[in-house]
Amino acid sequence: MSIRATKRQGRSRRLALFTGIAIAASVIPAAAQASANSAAAEKPVRGGNITAGIFDQVLTTCYSPNVPNSALGVLKTVYEGLVEKSSDGKFVPFLAKAITPSADFKTWTLSLRPGIKFSNGEPLDAAAVVLNLQALNGDYYLKNTATAVHTAGSGIPFTANLRKVEASGADVVMTLWTSQVDWLDTLYASGRFFMRAPSTIKSKDECATKGVGTGPFMFDTVTPTNVKVKRNPNYWRKDKAGTQLPYLDSITFDVQQQPTQRLNALRSGKYDAAQFTSAGEVKQILSVKSSNNLGSVDSKDSFYPTWWPNQGIEPFNNKNARLAFAHAWDNASYYKLRNCFKGKCLGNIPTSIVGKDNVMYNTKGFLKFDIKKSKEYQEAYKKETGKDLTFQINATLSDESLNNAKAAQQIFAKAGITTTINQEDGATQVANAFPGLAAAAAGKLNPYQAYAVLLFEGEGTGFILPFLQQNVFSEPGNNAKTERSPLLPIAGTALNVTRHKDTALTDLLYAAKQDITKARPAKLKALTKYIQENAVVVPTPTLMYTYGFGKKLRGYDTFELAAGKTGIPMTNAGINWTGIWVSK
C-alpha cells in the first residue's frame, strides 16, 4: 500500500541517509491558498511569530558546506532562485522573466523581472546575476583567490558546463561548452541555486551567517541548531488582494533530530510546524495524518534514494563486491520494516534507479534480491582478494536513522555479509561526501564505503547526471582547464560520489547528456541499464517528505507561474513560507 496523497493534501510535497525549455512568461505572485484546516471565508492576516521543527543543522548561509534538505528550506525563506519548478514538473522563470535557448542549446539568454531588490536595497540587475553565476561556477573565486574561498563550493563542478556568463544590456547571456537541453534544471539545482546580494558574495562573514537575498524573510540570528528569520518589509511580491507579502513577522527554525520529540513538540504546540521524512519517520508522519488537530502536506513520491558503493576504496573497488551487495539488498523486506507502520506504507519499492515518470526509467539491467547470486559473488570476491566481504554503513544521530541502519544490517546479514554502523551528524556526512575545492585539492573525497543518499529526483536529468560523471571538467568539448583555469579539474571529481573511473559509463553518459535529438531518451535508458547491471548505484524504496502544521496555521501557498501553472507546495526542502499566516 502506498500513500500518494491525502485529503488534506488535496485541499491544501536531501538527504536520504539511513540515516523542459523555458518560455517567456512573467511570474505573478499569488495569494496563499487556504490550508486543510482553514475555512474558505477566512482572509489572510498580517502578523505572527511561529516556530518550526526541522531535522538538519544549518551549518552556514553561504556556499559551503552544503546544507541538507530541511536546512535548505531555511535558506529558501531568505534566498530565491532564477528558476522555480511548477507542479507539472516543468522548470519556469521566477526571478527571471524569461530564459530562452539558442537552436543548439549552447547559449541561453535571461531577462529579469524589473524592479526587484535584495532586502538591503541592492538591485537585482544583470550585473548582480552575472556576479552570482560567476560565484557559483568558480570564476569569482579564481579571480579573487585570497578573499573569495568562501564561495568555492559544489556549485563549481555542478555548473562545469557554463563556459562564461556576461551582461548584454539588461539581459544576461550564459554560454555553455556543450549542448544541454536541461540547463534550466541545472539553474534550479534542486532548489539550491540562489541569488545572493553582491555584498554577501564579497563578504566572508556576511555570507556565513547573515546572507542577504531577495526572499520574503531576512536572517535575524543563525546558529547550527536554531535560526530565526524576520519579515523582509520590502519584499517584491504581493498577494492578489494587493497585500504585501509575507504575512508572518518571523519564523524560528529549531533543529530536533529525534522525530518523536519533533512530533511531541508539534502536538503540544511548542512547534507550530514540523518537517518529517519517510526515511525512517513513517510512524511519525502517519501519526500527523491521523490527528484531527493537525494539518499536513506531502511531497510527491518522486525522490529516489540510492546506495553509492565507493569504488575508490575497498571493498567496492571490486566489481564482484558491488554485485554481491546489490543481490543481497532486499528492498521488499526493507520497505516492510521501515516504510510501513500498522499496514500503512509510504513510498514504493523501486524497479529502477529512478521512478516511472523519469526519462531515464528502465527496468533492464535491474539487479534483484537473490541470496544465492550474492553468495556466488561473495565467493568470487574472496578468491580475488582473500577477504570476506564486509563494509560500513552510515546513520545520522536520530534514533530512527539508527534503526534504518540496523534494519539494513539485518538484511545484509541474511546474505552472509557483515556490516558495521558509523553514526554521525547528517550535515557532517554531507560535508565529507561532497567536498569543497580545498578539500578536493587535498584528496579528501567521499570517505564512506557505502553511502546512502538522495541525489536522484523528479522527471529530468539535471540533478542526476552530474553525480555520475567521473570528472565534470573532462567532458568532451569542455576546455575549462585551458581557457578558465588548470585548477578546475581538481574540483571536477567532487560530485563523483562513487569515485568511479569507468570509461564505458562515462561514454554512455556524455552521449546522452549532449544529445538534443529524439534519440536522447533511448540513450538515457541505455545509461540506466549499464548503471543497474554493474551496480554503480543500488536503489532503495522511494522517498517522500511531509510537513505537519498546528491547527491555527493557514496558507500552504502556491505560486502562479507561467501559463497559470502552480508551484510545488512541498519538496525535499519543505514548503514555501511566503503565504503562511496565523488564524486569529
Image: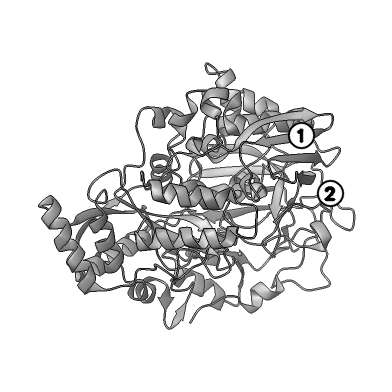
Q: State the image coordinates of residue 427 (x, y, percent, origin top left).
A: 43, 45
> Dot 2: few (<14), some (14–19), or many (≥20) neighbours within 10 Å?
some
Check the image and report above or below for 174 versus 144.
below
Q: Which three-letter amino acid code belongs to the residue tagged 2? A: Gln
Residue 395, quarter of picture: bottom left
Residue type, mark 1 in image: Val
Examine the rendered structure and indicate whether residue 50 appears above or below residue 220: below
Which residue is at a point 60% across and 59% down the rendered structure image? 519
Quarter that holds the C terminus: bottom right
Residue at 42 percent of width and 72 percent of height: 339
The mark that comes first in sequence, 2 or 1, is: 1
Q: Residues within 10 Å of mark 1 (few under 14, many from 20)?
A: many
Residue 314 on image: x %, y %: 23, 47
Which residue corresponds to mark 1? Answer: 172
Dividing the picture into quadrants, the one containing residue 231 is top right
Check disc 2 and report the residue beneath it: 244
- Residue at position x 29%, y 49% from top? 449
Q: Distance between the residues labelled 2 and 1?
A: 29 Å
The residue positioned 48% from the left and 73% from the top of the image is 346
Which percent across, then down, holds residue 225? 48, 44
Can residue 68 be seen here? The reply is: no
Residue 27 seen: yes
Q: Is mark 1 on a helix, strand or loop?
A: strand
Which of discs 2 and 1 lies nearer the camera? The answer is: 1
Secondary structure of the residue carrying numbered label 2: loop
